[in-house]
Image: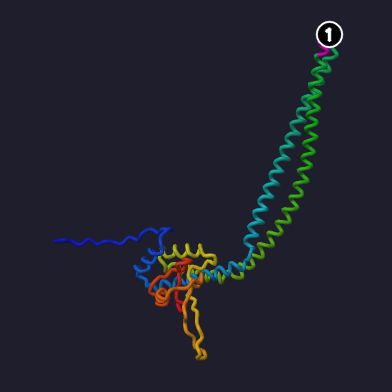
Amino acid sequence: MATTKKTTKVAAPVDERETFVSLQKNFAESEQSTQEKLKVLYELQAADVAIDDLVHQRGELPAEVAFLEEELSGLRAKSDRIGQLIEGYNQTIDAANKQIVELDAEIEKYRSQLENISNSREFDSINKELENQGLLRAIAEKNIREAREAIEDRKMERERLADRILIREEDLKAKQEELATIVESTAKEEKTLQAKRDACAAKIDERTLSAYERIRGNAHNHLAVVTLRYRYKDTEKEGDRVKLDAACGGCFHTITPQRMIDIESGKKLVICEHCGRIIVNPDI
């Protein structure tokens, strides 16, 4: 007796490069009705637009806060580098002072030897050593002077930096408080909208959601789902208008009558041929 083997349909992985034809096919094969999916997409878009509006209320503040934080980080790093330079100069001074002590001991030793010389050749040799030690001592003293001058210059530079850091810290604190006030005032509304968005996203399959995000990311106004825009003509009868045609609510290109019927029926996914946005019935 022959047995029938059950087959399980495996969903293909999401491909960022997939065509809209495959997306339409995915819509058609979904257990969820096309009309219901379009409605959820439209509600998702509405939530995203509302969240964008709240974020827009913050204006340039997030960017200004980030810029000030980055500037402060750079200023503090520069101050740290100056501190390291000062430490290096101090080490130079310590080494030079130590060298001078050693040179003074050598000079004193050679001077004492001058009292017990036996010939002119020995006298010239000791004097030559004294001259060399004296030159080395002068170089060490010069290094100390230059290091101390450099330390003073660096300290002044660091003080100017400290003043600038203080001003920027006050600016940052003010901007952060201003931003926190705005965020706090909209936090409850944003949380509600985010919950609504998450609920809508949960109702959409991964492939459709990926396509939605991609379309939204490519659109200059971040609208992935738009409605039909109708053009009417007034008749002689007062208050009566005749529908002439319709256009995409994203790019305003005219929609063909057949595609307009498909959109109005809500039974088919229609994507604008010009801007790539999903078009839905205004009455959705």
How would you rate the neighbour count of disc 1 (Cα within 10 Å): few for under 14, some for 14-19, many for 20 or more? few
Residue 27 occupies quadrant: bottom left
Q: Which residue is mark 1?
A: 119
* Outermost residue toward the top in this view: 119
Residue 193 appears left or right of 126: left
Identify the colour scheme used: rainbow
Camera-side residue of 57 and 256: 256
Residue 272 appears left or right of 169: left
Camera-side residue of 179 and 101: 179
Residue 104 occupies quadrant: top right
Residue flagged by tag 1: what amino acid is it? Asn
Is 212 rendered above or below residue 160? below
Reply yes or no: does residue 193 show up in magenta. Answer: no
Which range is magenta?
119-124
**Residue 111: percent from the left, percent from the top?**
84, 18
* Outermost residue toward the front in this view: 236
Residue 257 occupies quadrant: bottom left
**Residue 211: percent from the left, percent from the top?**
44, 63
Camera-side residue of 103 and 253: 253
For the residue labelled by badge 1, is the local secondary structure a helix, a strand or a loop?
loop
Which residue is painted at 71% across and 43% down in the image?
83
Q: Main secondary structure of the magenta part?
A: helix
Reply yes or no: does residue 120 show up in magenta. Answer: yes
* Outermost residue toward the right in this view: 115
For the C terminus, give its image quadrant: bottom left
* Outermost residue toward the left in this view: 1
**Residue 239: percent from the left, percent from the top?**
51, 89
